[in-house]
Amino acid sequence: MSNERIRAKQTARTSRGRRALFGLAVLCAAIVSLPATAQAPHYPSKPLKLIVPYPPGAATDNIARAFGQELAKVVGQPVIVENRPGGGSSLGIIAAKGQPADGYTLLVRAEGFYSAKLATPSLPYEFSDFEILAPLAQSSYAFIVAADRGWKRLDDLKNARREIDVGSLDLGVGVYSTLAARMARDLGIRYRTIPFKGGAEGLTAILAGQIDAYFTTIGTTQAVKDSPKVKVLATTGLPGGNNFLPGVKTFQELGLPNMVFSSSYSLNVRSDTPAPIKEQLSRAVQQALASEAMKTARRQLFLEPYAGSALDYRRDQARVLKEFEAAAAEDGKAAK
């Protein structure tokens, strides 16, 4: 075979090899450029887990279970509620953080998410580890006093020539301590906090006249609102927000606008969950929240929907965190 024919065959083989390599490169580039949703398997393809860091029967648990049923209808997969109470809600939060960031584990949280970490900074989670998908519901608070104290109006508390004993759930820095501090500052009164481990214990104390006053949720107040042993003086909601306590005015209507406050429950995922999954999950969550069943569940639990957008809610929570951090700093100074 002549040298020319040998060189021609070698050139042809080289050309075919280059074309094959080029084709492979184009194929790889096309695969890489595909959207994440096209590369990933169908989501969700298995049951979702909803971690609730509170015991069964708590308000957080009840609204989470109602929501889980509606979300299951939307996504076509079971939603399993897993209660992980303890440590001021930190055990459930840590459990959720320990799961893969794949959108299959969701966390329902309340203000304990902040309180637990502020009380114990060494807990193995950061606020930035989770992203809020949507608020589930919220509850304002009622301020009730022992009827035998003779206080008919908020201004009557100013006549007390002593510290007022205000019952509070023993949750460290958080809603209850914040509300008591705001009210004392705005009314110019002195108070001391009497901690209780549960809401029922606090109600028993106020009914027995063992404490002067008590902040508790609107739902819990339903059990005692008609008792002659207590009087509901005000709520922390917005005027016209709900009619769960007919005839009771808000702090704002009574001249204390700084006392507007609602405790809320929100749905969260790990912050590092892939964006396409978070987007798909957010749409499903909004659809579930808008269902008639969820509206009914909120009313039955004496809860309200959050009026703003998810972005508004994140901003509100950022303000709550700043206030809790300031309160924790003050507590730290007082302890020294």
Image (cartoon, rainbow, N blue to C red):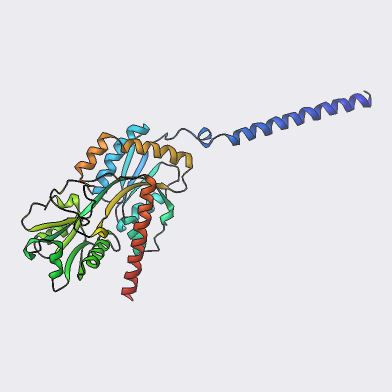
Q: Quadrant of residue 125?
A: bottom left
Provide residue 213's location: percent of width, then percent of height.
15, 63
Q: Quadrant of the N terminus?
A: top right
Q: Quadrant of residue 177?
A: bottom left
Provide residue 194's location: percent of width, then percent of height.
19, 66
Relative to 34, residue 133 above or below: below
- Number of on-image labels: 0
Please state which of residues 226 and 127 is positioned toward the viewer in this rendering. Answer: 226
Q: What residue is shown at x 15% (from left), y 73% (from top)? A: 162
Provide residue 169's location: percent of width, then percent of height.
22, 60
Q: What residue is shown at x 39% (from left), y 37% (from top)? A: 283
Relative to 204, residue 13 above or below: above
The extreme bottom residue here reads 336
Please state which of residues 145 and 76 is positioned toward the viewer in this rendering. Answer: 145
Would residue 211 be visible to someone looking at this image?
Answer: no
Q: Quadrant of the C terminus?
A: bottom left
Please state which of residues 58 and 191 is positioned toward the viewer in this rendering. Answer: 191
Would residue 325 be visible to someone looking at this image?
Answer: yes
The extreme right residue here reads 2
Q: Is residue 156 left or right of residue 266?
A: left
Q: Is residue 46 left or right of residue 178?
A: right
Provide residue 10's location: percent of width, then percent of height.
85, 28
Q: Is residue 135 left or right of residue 11?
A: left
